[in-house]
Image (tube, rainbow, N blue to C red):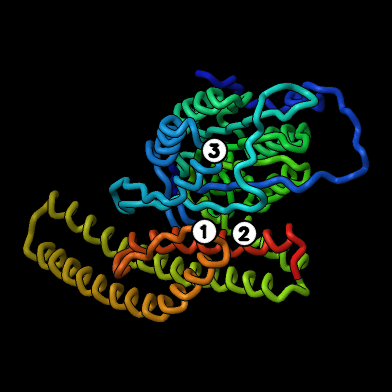
Amino acid sequence: MAGHGGAATVQKRNVPSEENEYDECEDEGTTGTPPEEGSATVIAAATSTEWSFDNSFTPALIEALDKNPHLGIDEVLLMMGEKTLFVGGEQPQHHPQVAQHGQKGREADNTSECGENARKAVLVANNNYLDQGAGPLPGPIPETRQLAGELEQRGYKTSQHDDQSAVEMDAHYNSVISSLKAGDDLVLAFSGHGAPEGLVGIDYTWSYYDIFSNAQVESTISGATSRGANIRFIIDSCHSGSVTDLVRSERRNELAQLTADRFDSQMYLGTAAYLENSKQKIKDYVHGRVNALNGVNWAIEDVKYQLAQDSNLLLRAKLFALQAYKSYLTSLLNEKADELWAEMVINLNAIKMLLSFATGTRMPAFPAKPTHYNTFGTILDVLEVMENAAILAVEKEVAEGGD
């Protein structure tokens, strides 16, 4: 569970009371007609198998927002989803992931209160984890404060909450959800430690899993879109791609029920499922590769440490043997990568052409030869774009009422 990683109103360890701190207007009642479904854009700093790092994703997002004031937040997040972020160390790169559904780019055009659309943002930043196993993080609070300032310049009423447990996160996020009206814009953000299961709260220990689960994230997003609001959820944590995977999977399931009798829609949903399966194969390979090479790398570093204390011929021979084994293992893993990609690439290129024609979506190119771990991250980015396009094609059919 490596971590990853002003203008705002900063509040610490405060859970919203029953009186909703975000709702400044009287309840105007409902007409009995459910609002048109809103839109969602979810961006994760890394794939489900990757770490995220301080001074990487959030600063890059802040820079992109600052340099592109003419673009809506959705457009900027899509730009970020196509980036590869270079950080060095054991994992030299990480690859932001985007899941998107509903009509895109519908940012509220004003910040007026009550009867008109509003822009709100609730950001959580966790630095000071209680358990030393999780470890403190220097970046989330100051980076999130800068992000809040960028959002305020775009007209969002922004609040930041530092060092929050999962229960407190849930209270803050859902308090603002309950205040939303159709057409409102909401940005939620989390920066801190992440796990494959979700966002890690400040009270996490190895015996107490303080986690705001991926399912809770998905439920929060659904709560906003069901009210007709447009939500962006920005997650800067390790393994955060597991959230975008779940959001996309749930959306496929919803659309499958709505389009059970529509051939084209079922074809696109089947395509999306195939792409998801292809992504999982790649993730399994990457996870196995990282684990295998990390084991050898740790053994090499251990011998180097021993040599620094007491240089002798036996340790030098052991170091030589480990380095030779690493070279051999890397060669085997590269061959496996070639085999995996060869069995995928023809079908994936055909699907890419189909989706480009059907949706008018620009599809980025695959790298020529993914024989390195980082190159597979780029492939995952392309597959994310393709899967989002397949879901968009079904949503378009649903909106048009096609057969």
Q: Is residue 388 left or right of residue 381?
A: right
The amino acid type, in three-letter code, at marker 1 is Thr
Q: Is residue 161 left or right of residue 328?
A: right
Residue 381 vs 128, above or below: the answer is below
Q: Judging from the image, what secondary structure is the residue with disc 3 in?
A: helix
Give the residue at mark 1: 361
Q: Which of the two discs, 1 and 3, sits closer to the camera?
A: 1
Q: Is residue 88 left or right of residue 171?
A: left
Q: Position of residue 286 (x, y in %)?
A: 40, 66
Q: Residue at x 55, y 42 (%)?
A: 74
Q: Residue at x 42, y 41 (%)?
A: 57
The amino acid type, in three-letter code, at marker 3 is Ile
The quadrant where residue 390 appears: bottom right
Q: Visible in this render: residue 208?
A: no
Find the distance from the CA under tag 1 to the CA under tag 3: 18 Å
Residue 239 vs 168, above or below: the answer is below
Question: What is the crowding at mark 2: few (fewer than 14 residues within 10 Å), some, or many (at least 20)?
Answer: many
Q: Position of residue 153 (x, y in %)?
A: 53, 23
Give the residue at mark 2: 392
Give the residue at mark 3: 73
Closest to the observer: 299 or 196?
196
The amino acid type, in three-letter code, at marker 2 is Leu
For this orientation, the residue located farthest to the right is 32
